[in-house]
Amino acid sequence: MIVIKVGGGAGVDIDAVCADVSAVVQTGQQVVVVHGTSAAADSLAARMGVPARTIQSPSGYVSRYTDPETLEVYTMAAAGQVNKQLVTKLQSLGVNAVGLSGVDGRLMGARRKDAVRAIDPVTGKQRVVRDDYTGRIEQINGALLRLLLDAGYTPVIAPLALGLECERLNVDGDRAAAMVAGAINADTLVILSNVPGLLAHFPDEASLIRHLGKNEMTRAIDLAGGRMKKKVLAAQEALEVGVPRVVLADSRRPNPIRAALEGEGTVITQ
């Protein structure tokens, strides 16, 4: 089994990814797709007059600030626009895709971060944010995914989870994909974005780091910048839940998934 995380940022080649999902599924491989939402959520928020804001943690991780109003926009973009776009495209390519969010069937259970420490962008000081509806995944309904896979479906998962009080929560798509991969005992997690992998000297693509071992992950997280930091953290978490191999790879190249499975990108192993 393979889990594919499709980035939600600008520059990700959705057509190339979906075409390759179809090619991989046609070989008989079982595939789960987890997708991001960032660009679509920002665009929808702008059209609705809702400011798109981010939170930076003291350790440098950047995430979407998700107050109740933003949560509504994010839900529409994630579970509606992006999820159904991917499902429709995959169906047109002969893949029997089924769209889900983590809320459906309690697919992803998360604990809400009641108090989030953030760096104030003006003062540079730490502050506490209490109206943020983001969460950290604690449980995956692997039985539901295996049921769908064994019935011939390709699950396509939007990054929303169900909280302990049955509230919707925004969860990080990369880290969600890592937990999904562990829950279904996937052979490989492929995280696709708009860069070739982890770069030693961003944005110099010639500085691609081609292989990392589990014991090198702390250094790799320190090296990564921006959104790549969370992708490397997700790779580390995937290894911790037993996934043998993670590949950080480029969605913009031909056959991006098959290229990643052949080792194109940053290959991270146990």
Image (tube, helix red, strand yellow):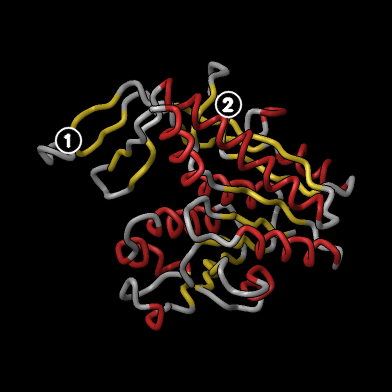
Task: Answer with the quarter of the image where residue 188 lies.
Answer: bottom right
Please say if 72 is above or below 262: above
x then y, percent, for residue 84: 69, 40
- 270 vs 208, left or right, is right
Q: CA distance from mark 2 to mark 1?
A: 28 Å
Q: Is residue 270 visible?
A: no
Specify the quadrant of the image occupied by residue 143. Answer: top right
Most foreground residue, 269 or 45:
45
Q: Pick out the residue farthest to the top.
A: 165
Please tell me the numbered disc located at residue 74: none
Residue in the image at 81% along x and 57% along y: 93
Q: Of the residues shown, which amino acid type is indicated by label 2?
A: Leu
- Single out the residue that lies furthest toward the front: 47
Residue 76 against residue 18 in the figure, above or below: above
Q: Which residue is mark 2?
A: 162
Residue 184: x percent and y percent?
71, 49
Picture disc at residue 126: 1
Q: Image quadrant for the C terminus?
A: bottom right
Q: Quadrant of residue 112?
A: top left
Examine the rendering and report whether any part of residue 118 can be seen: yes
For badge 1, the amino acid type reads: Gln
Q: Residue 134's x, y, as percent?
A: 44, 31
**At which x and y percent is residue 46?**
41, 35
User: Looking at this view, is 193 or 119 the one in front?
Assistant: 193
